Amino acid sequence: MGKNLLIFLSAAGVALLAILLLPTRSPSRSLWKWRRTSADLVVMNATIYTSDHSLPFAEAMAIRNGRILGVGNYSSVKDLVGYGTRELNLNGKVVIPGFIDSHAHFINGGLQMGQVELRGVESQDSFAKKVKEAVKDKVPGEWVLGGGWNNDLWGGDFPCISWIDDISPNNPVWLSRMDGHMGLANSLALKIAGITNDTHNPVGGTIVKTNDGEPTGLLVDSAMKLILSLIPEVSIHGRREAMVRASKYALMRGVTTMTDFGRYFPGASVDHVWHDLSDVYKWADSAGKMLIRVCLFFPMQTWSQVVDLFQEKGRALSQWIYLGGVKAFADGSLGSNSALFYEPYEDDPDNYGLQVTDIDWLLNATLESDKSGLQVAIHAIGDKANDMVLDMFDSVASFNGMRDRRFRIEHAQHLAQGATTRFGQQKVIASVQPDHLLDDADSAEKKLGAFRARKESYLFHSLLAGDALLAFGSDWPVADIYPLRGIKTAMSRVPPGWDAAWIPSERIALNDALKAHTISAAYACFLDHDLGSLSAGKYADFVVLPANSWDEFSSDLPSSVLATYVNGVQAYPSNSM
């Protein structure tokens, strides 16, 4: 009797379980749906710009385990509402994919947030005052570091050693220009570095001197290494703090993925990105402290190590850390008069700029990197440098054969006639930074002449018309992390103090600018299968904006975001909406 009863109860239990697991007429009510496919979050009553051409706009989005289950109208996702699903009613507010910053120096930016901030300084007195305040907190012999200065803001003259020597007799000082291609040292720093009247310029760099041969304290491009190699390395703890600080700042601006190019000057140590990967990013990943995704590019000198890492780990080290490729420099910068041009600088008639990397080495390293399957990105600003890199990319592609390689030129600021078409024909990505034109509009016309500057500067519309792909970034800390301002800049091209657009024919439409900071930026680093659009299967990284309709958003772009979500979880602000 007892045995038969036990068999009966067991059979009944199996039958009941089978009934519970059967789908019902209302899938959203089935226990199977609740347990297996119901959403963690459903965003509803929103104006969702997807950056996906197959469905440009939607009103609802369902998310589970950090990925998007479905996007469309509410009726198409309501069946994914189940036990425990949170519904977020946005009352029509605009939602866009999380911004991808295609070019930054991320940990450097975080470090600079704690140093002497010279961005926006407009006079010698203000410059010296900032340094004097920093020296007060230093013990003798301790380095005073900072940057962000822009000589164009006080008339164009470069700062010199006399500005800071009297206020820093016992502390070596190094202050980098906003573009990272020039810096100012005081006399003590020059003495430590052994730089005198007799010191020769290194290859790819300049020690700026007076007519009498005295160093002015300014070092350009590769010459900066003479000082930078002596500055004590920031501790692991300091770099980790900088990464977390930078991540929180990026989230505040709606950035959910950052392409990190490491330190940002020719001749920098080739080991720095590797140290950041092992000491900072991998540590943060294992400790659960990664707040945004990063895609890392490594110095081209280490291409064989990058190949080994790709073969061992693949592109994704985790959902937070991705391997991009390798990067090299072709020239310097416009502001430092070291970008490479066909014609000389208007304000420096004997100067055509600098080719900061030996062309034979660059060609051979690019050939080997590309042959090994790596993505190659090369910094080029001047028109001659861009043509040189395009020629080289064309030769490498012909020699190594067809494949999906996605060559990148970083900055692509000044382009000779025909170059915009070549970007499209050769499928070279133009990784550009719109906000740089806010600083360059005035200086470019002084350095290149108005006619030449307006013919070849920041040709965003022409690049798109030539079927090139634009990927937007900030170049932080050279410019601020600020995608919404960058998008507005690309659309309006009105520099500070101007009443009209600079080269208005090169303005682009809102949709093109948004794509350049989302899906095109994801494509530019081989992450478009996981990121860049709000599409089913991709990570649920998105931004909520303070606009109540698309018309309101497109007619008056906001300057801030309401909230930033990563993996479907609100990351900024930290408190729930």
Image (cartoon, rainbow, N blue to C red):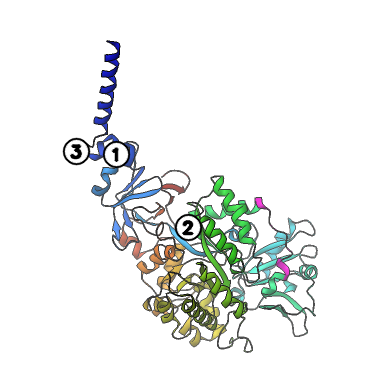
Q: Would you identify the image quadrant in which residue 326 lies?
A: bottom right
| Helix, strand or loop status at disc 2 | strand
Return the residue at label 3. Answer: 25
The mark found on residue 257 in the picture is 2
Disc 1 and disc 2 in contact, CB within 8 angstroms: no
Please, is residue 291 above or below residue 507 in the view? above
Left or right: residue 17 versus residue 183 is: left
Q: For mark 1, does the 10 Å Cα neighbourhood hold few (<14), some (14 to 19), or many (20 or more) residues?
A: many
Check the picture and name the quadrant holding the C terminus: top left
Which amino acid is tagged 2? Thr
N-terminal of the pair, mark 1 or mark 3, is: 3
Left or right: residue 202 versus residue 340 is: right
Which amino acid is tagged 1? Lys
| Helix, strand or loop status at disc 3 | loop
Disc 1 to disc 3, C-alpha distance: 12 Å
Left or right: residue 154 versus residue 313 is: right
Q: Nearer the viewer, residue 242 or 170?
A: 242
Magenta segment: 226-237
Taking the spot 48% from the left edge, 66% from the top edge, the residue there is 473
N-terminal of the pair, mark 3 or mark 2, is: 3
Q: Can residue 22 be seen in the rendering of this structure?
A: yes
The mark found on residue 33 in the picture is 1
Q: Nearer the viewer, residue 3 or 351?
A: 3
